[in-house]
Amino acid sequence: MKALKDISWLRKTASFFPSRIILTANNYRLFDVLEGRGRTAGALAKAASADTRGMELLLNSLVAIGLLEKEEGKYRNAPVASRYLVKGKPDYQGDILRHYDILWDNWSCLDLAVKTGRPQRKSGDHESFILGMHNLALQRVNKVVGSLDLKGVKTVLDLGGGPGTYSMGFARRKIAATLFDLPETLKISKKLIEDSGLGDRVRLLPGDFMKDDLGGPYDMIFISQILHAYGAKQCVSMLGKCRASLREGGRIVIQEFHLDETKTGPVQGALFAVNMLVNTPEGRTYTPAEMTSWLKKSGFEDRETKVIDETVLISGRKK
Ligand SMILES: C[S@@+](CC[C@H](N)C(=O)[O-])C[C@H]1O[C@@H](n2cnc3c(N)ncnc32)[C@H](O)[C@@H]1O
């Protein structure tokens, strides 16, 4: 990251103001209520059993941020809120906001996390976590799956695939996908997959990837946004387990937030490491060199690195 030339980042210290305002508006489902029609602060307060002054100040701040518009005392969604924050819209991001709201509690204990090195998990909500992963992955799935060399790939294991967004992306390309995840996650993904009409092309395999057999042999294993939750030793052991579940010549593809060799950028990768400090005992983001060395150690050759926006894909072929 570049050295600061002004105090822009220090000013951003108060960027929790807009964060908190948006999270609270999302919790009140204001964007759903305001879709397609203008309402006054009084009417919205009454409907939400909230204080009128509280609601009005919140609404005015949302206009300032650019998420709402105000005309003759009535508020309505601005186009960006209408596209991303109204439940049921294809680009909906409200679930990941609910997940960020949970993270807020844990991040509030960052002082203690730095002092102790221990996670500070005050809150948790599995449903918003998994649906939030779906919100995020939907924005990327076509680009990521479209960037992979899928020649000869007929079966893929989506390890820790969560909502199944990537499994569905593979299934749409006529590849038989196995979505391996914890039983409580698969309860949520099952509905998403059924709703997509791809139920016959995605197999759900419940299990704990630390303890259980992964099945196979598969032509490809896709392991997305998993390794950052673990320490290096566990990552190496997981990659070895993946190798055992691939056919000879099969490929593994790791997707993680991109962190360059300085470990100080890009910003998203460096900041996400702190999210892992707050939420996991040993996790952090990893550099391509770290992950590539684990692949080498675990018996993968023809290793490749590809950066796609804020994530990096590291792949290798089973020797
Ligand atoms: C950060 S999400 C990633 C989801 C998905 N791969 C993606 O990129 O959108 C991590 C996933 O790992 C799953 N998971 C965590 N621990 C697991 C375990 N021990 N066994 C199987 N799945 C696990 C979670 O349920 C969750 O779906």
Image (cartoon, rainbow, N blue to C red):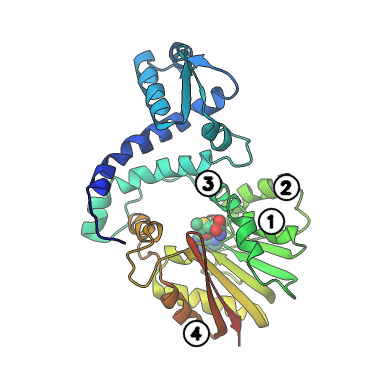
CA distance separating discs 4 and 2: 37 Å
The residue indicated by pointer 1 is 168
Query: Which circle's residue, 4 or 1, is located before the other in the chain?
Result: 1
- Coordinates of residue 57 in the picture (x, y in percent): 35, 21
CA distance separating discs 1 and 3: 16 Å
Query: Which circle's residue, 1 or 3, is located before the other in the chain?
Result: 3
> Dot 4: what SS?
helix
Amino acid type, mark 4: Lys
CA distance separating discs 4 and 1: 29 Å
> Dot 1: what SS?
helix
Q: Which mark is residue 132?
A: 3
Amino acid type, mark 2: Ser
Query: Which circle's residue, 3 or 4, is located before the other in the chain?
Result: 3
* Callout 3 touching callout 4 (CB < 8 Å): no
Q: Residue at x 40, y 61 (%)?
A: 269
* Callout 1 touching callout 2 (CB < 8 Å): yes
- Coordinates of residue 162 in the picture (x, y in percent): 58, 55
Does the closest atom of ligand 1 sit within 8 Å of the Cβ of label 4? Answer: no
Query: Which circle's residue, 1 or 2, is located before the other in the chain?
Result: 1
Q: Which mark is residue 296?
A: 4
* Callout 2 touching callout 3 (CB < 8 Å): no
Q: Look at the image and tell me whether residue 216 can be seen.
A: no
Q: Residue at x 26, y 46 (%)?
A: 8
Q: Please state, as top left, top right, bottom left or bottom right, where the N terminus lies in the image.
A: bottom left
The residue indicated by pointer 2 is 196
Horizontal relation, residue 71 to residue 36: left or right = left
CA distance separating discs 3 and 4: 33 Å
- Coordinates of residue 174 in the picture (x, y in percent): 77, 63
> Dot 2: what SS?
helix
